Image: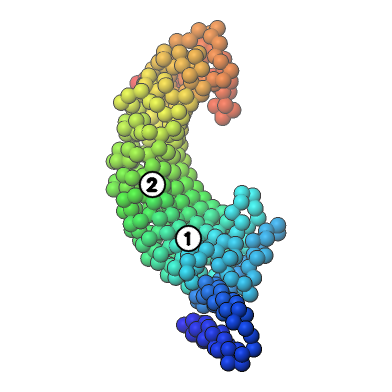
Amino acid sequence: MEGKSQSRSFKSRSFGFLPQKHKQGAMGTSAKVLLLALFLVCEHSIVFAMLDPLDFLALQSIRKSLDDMPGSTFFSQWDFTSDPCNFPGVFCEADKVIALNLGDPRAGSPGLTGRLDPAIGKLSALTELSVVPGRIIGVLPETISRCRNLRFLAISKNFLHGGIPASFSDLRSLQTLDLSYNLLTGFIPRSLGQIPSLSNVILCHNRLSGSIPPFIAPNLIRLDLKHNDLSGAISPNSLPASLQYLSLSYNRLAGPVDRILPRLGRLNYLDLSMNRFTGTIPSSVFSFPISSLQLQRNQFTGEVAPREEVRISTVDLSYNHLSGQISPLFSSVQNLYLNNNKFVGQVPGTFVDGLLSAGIQILYLQHNFLTGIEIKPTAEIPLSSSLCLQYNCMVPPLQTPCPLKAGKQKTRPTAQCSEWRG
């Protein structure tokens, strides 16, 4: 308020100068009109450029706590003797900062070093805050939660540590939260899932622990929590049906998903790999409008029975405890990984057709209990396709290259096959 008073008094002094010149009669009518016009323009410029004092001081504090990395010139134009609303990365409306994008956004450009100053919370009209990848350390300022109009918060690929402040739940207008690729620890605040406006939550590649809180946002589209240390089961109703992208890979999540996944029929990307999920895989999953289904390296059991021909390009169910016969409805999958399970019986003939026609590019069936495949030893599999059959209850009818991790043993020991057949 003090700054605004100074502004008003300055404008009064400016206009007070004109009558004094008029009294002296020192210039003609044209000169007076020209001078008046100049002062009007100057006065308008002063009003337009006058940033709210609190925002001005906040920007100064933010600048003092950050520096350019070698090769970055982002702060070279932050000269506080000029209008801060013309600084790179600063966007204003009236006398308030509404967006702050710190660092050069071009791919490959060096980022910033330093810490995020708590003064960010004084930018009361802020709707967007982003920081480019760099070497910013320290914790997330809790004061960010005072920016009640914030809709977009993205600070990824830096070195932030500590927890996600529970006070972020005060950001009721927040739509996108991206804190990925940092060193954040602790739980995901349960209150964070209660923000109703969320549409994108990206917290991957951190060190977060605990369980996944329920998310109530009816328009949540993307939830990316991969590469953390999350554990426990997922409550059946904790994920909204609006989800289109769900990645939970590389955690320690457990429990069944047969009551969770059928509700998520809008998914176009699903990755639950590298966890400890148990139970059966719902048949409805294979009808989702997705291009890649990643369920490998879990503890899924039971038979796998799609309801219709699977139109997913890549299906990875490897390294589970799945059993029963392989459904021929998988023969339309371009890249199919069923290795390291407990599948039995014959390989459907439709798989052979798909291989020979190059419709199937990868078919990994190694380390199961399969007993045969109808393919001629002289069959020529296209170079673009790959088949691995070793370590089953059969002698592979043809020699094909397998991944190194499949081992060198071609056939499973007879005793294991007899025991599995019961």
Using the image, determine if residue 35 lies above or below residue 71: below
User: For the C terminus, which image quadrant?
Assistant: top left
Left or right: 131 in relation to 348: right
Residue 40 circle label: none
Residue under the image location 56 percent in, 15 percent down: 382
Residue 258 seen in render: no
- Where residue 147 appears, as percent x and y from the top left, is 43, 67
Question: Which residue is under mark 1?
Answer: 128
Using the image, determine if residue 229 lies above or below residue 328: below
Residue 217 seen in render: yes
Element under disc 2: loop
Near mark 1 (Cα within 10 A), the count class, few <14, some 14-19 or many ≥20, is many
Return the residue found at the far right: 70
Residue under the image location 33 percent in, 57 percent down: 196
Q: Amino acid at mark 1?
A: Glu
**Residue 140 or 155: which is nearer the viewer?**
155
Question: Which residue is under mark 2?
Answer: 221
- Where residue 390 appears, as percent x and y from the top left, is 52, 20
- Where residue 75 appears, as percent x and y from the top left, is 64, 64
Near mark 2 (Cα within 10 A), the count class, few <14, some 14-19 or many ≥20, is some
Disc number lying in front (2 or 1)? 1
* Rendered image quadrant of residue 350: top left
Left or right: 190 in relation to 60: left
Residue under the image location 49 percent in, 48 percent down: 227
Q: CA distance from mark 2 to mark 1?
A: 19 Å
Return the residue found at the far front: 29
Q: Amino acid at mark 2?
A: Ile
